[in-house]
Image (cartoon, coloured by chain):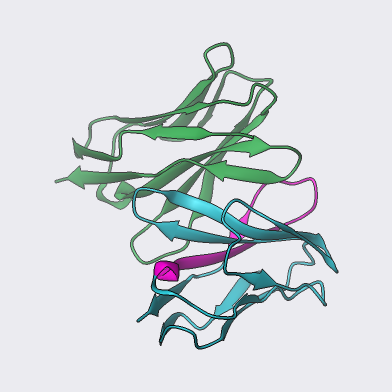
Chain colours: A cyan, B green
Amino acid sequence: EAQVTQNPRYLITVTGKKLTVTCSQNMNHEYMSWYRQDPGLGLRQIYYSMNVEVTDKGDVPEGYKVSRKEKRNFPLILESPSPNQTSLYFCASSFRDSQKLFFGSGTQLSVL
Amino acid sequence: GENVEQHPSTLSVQEGDSAVIKCTYSDSASNYFPWYKQELGKRPQLIIDIRSNVGEKKDQRIAVTLNKTAKHFSLHITETQPEDSAVYFCAGLQGAQKLVFGQGTRLTINP
C-alpha cells in the first residue's frame, strides 16, 4: 500500500531533550516536506527536500534540523526542544513537478 | 512569496444546505490551487484542485472556482452531509513545488 509513515504518533518530552520524528514513504517520491499545524495558523512548512542530500528551509525552520540520506526517509530532528514547539507535525511527499501532496498520519508533540 | 488568506475560520450549515469557503492569494504567478480535507484526528487529504487555465472544476458535490483577476478561489459543497464535517485547507503554489496553506476552515454539518 502506498503510504507515508510517521513515528511516533504521540510524544511527550521535556525541554532540552533531543528527539527525532521519523518519516518514510514507499512511493519513490523525490519531494518531501515537514509541516507543523497550529490552531488558526494552518499548515506551515518547516523544511523541505527536493531529492537525496538536497534540503532547504521553509517558513518556520528555527529549532529544527532535517536530513535526507536516503530517498525514502526524511527525519525531523529537534536538538533542544522548547515548549513553543508543542504542535501537530505532518510529513508529506510528492513526485517532483507534481504538487499533489501525500501526508503522513501526524505526530502530536508536547514539550513540557 | 505567496500569502494565502482563508475565510471563514468556522462555518456551520444545516445538512442538505450548501457551504462555501473562500481564499485569496497574493502571488499572481501562482497557477495551482488545491483543497485538502482533514477529518478529526486524521491527515489532510487532497479532495480537489484547479489550475489557472480553467475557471471552474467539479467533482460530484464539490466544486472549485477561480478568479485570477481578483486572485481568489472558492470551494463549494452542495447537498452537505454529516461526513462533510472536517477542517478544510486551501493552498496556493509558490514556485514549482511549495504549497502555501490557508489558515483552515472548520466546517460543521448540523443534522
Provide residue A102's location: percent of width, then percent of height. 61, 59
Quick check: B93 left or right of B62? right
Image point 28% across, 38% down: which residue?
Answer: B80
Q: Which of B48 and B8 is in front in this view?
A: B8
Quick check: B95 left or right of B50? right
Q: In which quarter of the image is residue A71?
A: bottom right
Q: Can residue A17 be seen in this view?
A: yes
Q: Which of A23 and A61 is in front in this view?
A: A61
Q: In which quarter of the image is residue B94?
A: top right
Q: Quadrant of residue A22?
A: bottom right
Image point 58% across, 18% down: which residue?
Answer: B55
From which residue to which does the magenta span run? A84-103
A82 shown above or below B35: below
Q: Nearer the viewer, residue B16 or A27?
A: A27
Q: Can residue A30 be seen in this view?
A: no
Quick check: B102 left or right of A34? left
Based on the picture, tell me whether residue A14 belongs to the magenta stretch. no
Provide residue B35's location: percent of width, then percent of height. 51, 41
Image point 73% across, 37% down: which residue?
Answer: B95
Provide residue A78's location: percent of width, then percent of height. 57, 77
**Quadrant of the image for the N terminus of chain B?**
top right
Based on the picture, tell me whether residue A87 belongs to the magenta stretch. yes
Q: Nearer the viewer, residue B56 or A48?
A: A48
Specify the farthest residue to the top: B69
Provide residue B98's location: percent of width, then percent of height. 67, 45
B87 shown above or below A49: above
Image point 50% across, 83% down: which residue?
Answer: A8
